[in-house]
Structures are given as structure tokens and as C-alpha cells.
Amino acid sequence: MDMLSKKLAIVKSITGEYDDMQELTVLVADRDEKAISYIPLTGRAKPGQSVLLNTTAVELSLGTGGFHFVIANLDEPESSMSPGGHIMKLRYTPYQIKCFAVEEQGSKYHEQINAFESLEKLPVAVGTLHSQLVPFACTAKKLMPGKSIAYIMTDGAALPMYLSKNVKELKNKGLIDHTITCGNAFGGDFESVNVYSAMIFAKQVLRADIIFVCMGPGIAGTGTKYGFTGIEQAYILDAAVKLGGTSIAVPRVSFADKRERHRGISHHTVTVLRDAVCSRVVVPINIQDEEKLATLEKQLEGSGLSRLHEIYRVKGDSTKAAMDEFGMKARSMGRGFDEDEEFFKSASGAASYIAEVLL
């Protein structure tokens, strides 16, 4: 059974260009379509060149923004890897890549990581959607401008960090200080083999004041209780506790989502915090509307989350002010702040908790 749809195309124009990624207009079977080329994987494409595309997601009408992905530049098919690094990601696939992982024996950080004892209550906020990163980072930098933030991107969704324009903009504006890609995710400032050592590296080497962990763009879900990649939030929260950190769950909250299972507190958050996580963690609630807060409190009580975890009511909301101050926009499930403010406020609530209680 074929799992991959491939098409030949000609590059017509470059519509967007970054250090690590190009957005292209390509001619596919007499039609102009969009494609993404990751420069570290396939090189820099030029107009007129022939490329081989992975067209699978577009043909399935999945949420990739209508982009195909360049598999190979047929006019420049050969390349040589840069020196250094022995850890493979995307292992045993035709696209396996080598990286220099911070933990590996040849790393200058190897001994520092080996000397780790504890996160020493370092705040570790763990989300489930990539769109939670922007409101969290903006609020954290507004409330705690001198504190450094390390963003750890997991392999629960997009694997190349290059895809995230949010990360590019946050980095350029100094709203996140360091990025680490763990597992099979790649393309961060630093690479690690798993989320444990990524957190250890953030503490031991980067001296981060705050860690934020979540996947890249493109959560996968199936409509079943446990069948969504955001369930990784549970074991990451547990990992942070085991390593001696202050583990903070970023709840997924919305009053704009038409799907009943995602209204108020999402069933994803309930599943993680009631049925999957093993540790008691902090759950910040950042809702000011009394009617909506009452709905949330009823859900927290009915699901047992009020008993299982430390529910913290945020004292003051800075989400919109912070995002406006730094000129950052964000969307989640196609909705912006004005359309779904509780989602973005709930994402930033962890930053408010850290500012109000920990730092």
C-alpha cells in the first residue's frame, strides 16, 4: 500500500524566504500550487528548477495551509553534510538526518548534563497546542522582562521547527531566548534526544528562568479519548515533577469552539489531567467573565480536577496588552484573540502564575 503521493513540479517563483525555509509557487500538472522547501534538507531552490514534491497532505485536504513539501531538487540532487554530530533523527527513513545532540559524548555540554541533580523548582509550563506559545511568551516577557525563556519543541506535531513563523518572530523580538528540539523534532538552536535531557540542558547550561514545552504546528487527533498527540502533556508534566521542577499545565479552554467536547475546558485537558498524568500539578485559570468562570468551575469540580490538582485563579490578566505591546498576532483553529479570547488568556495564565507566585 502506497503511503506517499509524489509529483514532479517546476519552481515558478519564490514567494517567501527565510534562513531555513522557502515558500514557492510551483507548476504541477499545468496548475500553480504552493510548496515549502526546507533549505537544510533540500538546498535553496531557484526559479526554473525541477523538484520532486510530497503532495500527500494537500490531496487529503489536511491542515498544512495548502502547501506541498519539496523532497528533492532534481537539478541539484547531491549535497554533503556539515561536520559534527552523530545522533540521527527521523531514524531509518530515507530522510534520516544527523544532528549534534547536546547530550552526546562529543558534546561540550556532556559533563554538565551528567552533573545534573535537580531542576530546583524551576517553572516548567507544558502546553498542548503550538498556538499557546505566543500568548505565554508575550505575557512572560511583559511581566518578567529580565527572565530568560527556553522553548522546548516536542515531536508531537510538525518535526521541523523551521515551519513555525511564530518561533521566528518570537526569537527576532527577543520574546523567547533559546529553542531546543527534542525527540525527532529538529531545527532548534539546540538538539536533544528526549524531553528529559532538553529540560536538564535548559537548566544546567542555558540557565533558563522559565521553560515552556509544547509541540510544533499541527496537532493530530482522532476523535477518540486517548487518540491525540497532545496527550504527551501528561508524561511531560510527570517528567518535570520527577526532575524537581514546578510543573504547570496550560489548559486548553475555549468558548468559541463549536465542538461541544472542546467548549469550556477541552476534553483533551480533562483526559490528560484526570486520566493520564500521575502527578499533582498546578493548573492556572485565567478567566474573568463571571458566567464563563462559573462554567469552568463546574467542569473542574465535575471532572475531579479541583481535587486532583492545584487550581490557581490568576489575579490579573495581561494577555491582550502583552501581545499588543510586542506587536504579536496569533491564531488557533483559525480564530484570533478577539474571536476566542479565553483560549489565549488560558495559554498566558501559566506566565501570570509564574510572575505572581514563583518569580
Image (cartoon, helix red, strand yellow):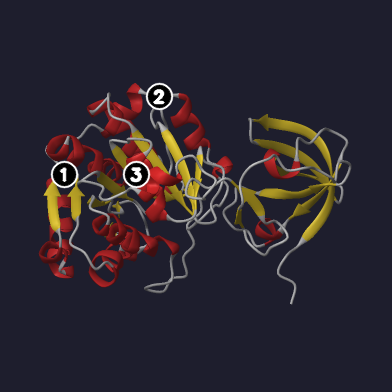
Query: Split into 4 quadrants, where in the image is the C terminus?
Result: top left
Q: Residue at x 18, y 41 (%)?
A: 353
- Whether residue 82 is visible, yes or no, is yes
- Whether residue 216 is visible, yes or no, is no
**Image position of 194 (left or right of 340):** right
Image coords of residue 232 (percent x, y): 39, 62
Image coords of residue 33 (percent x, y): 75, 45
Q: CA distance from mark 3 to mark 1?
A: 27 Å
Q: Amino acid at mark 3?
A: Phe
Q: CA distance from mark 2 to mark 3?
A: 20 Å
Mark 1 highlights which residue?
289
Q: Amino acid at mark 2?
A: Gly
Image coords of residue 293 (percent x, y): 15, 51
Disc 2 secondary structure class: loop
Image coords of residue 200 (percent x, y): 35, 48
Dot 2 surroundings within 10 Å: few (below 14), some, or many (20 or more)? few
Q: Amino acid at mark 1?
A: Asp
Q: CA distance from mark 1 to mark 2?
A: 25 Å
Dot 3 surroundings within 10 Å: few (below 14), some, or many (20 or more)? many
Upstream in the sequence, badge 3 or badge 1?
Answer: 3
Upstream in the sequence, badge 2 or badge 3?
Answer: 3
Labels in figure, total: 3
Image vertical order of residue 277 relative to residue 129, above or below = below
User: Which residue is more in the foreground, 225 or 111?
Assistant: 111
Disc 1 secondary structure class: loop
Using the image, tell me which numbered label, if any, was put on residue 212.
3
Using the image, tell me which numbered label, if any, was put on residue 327.
2
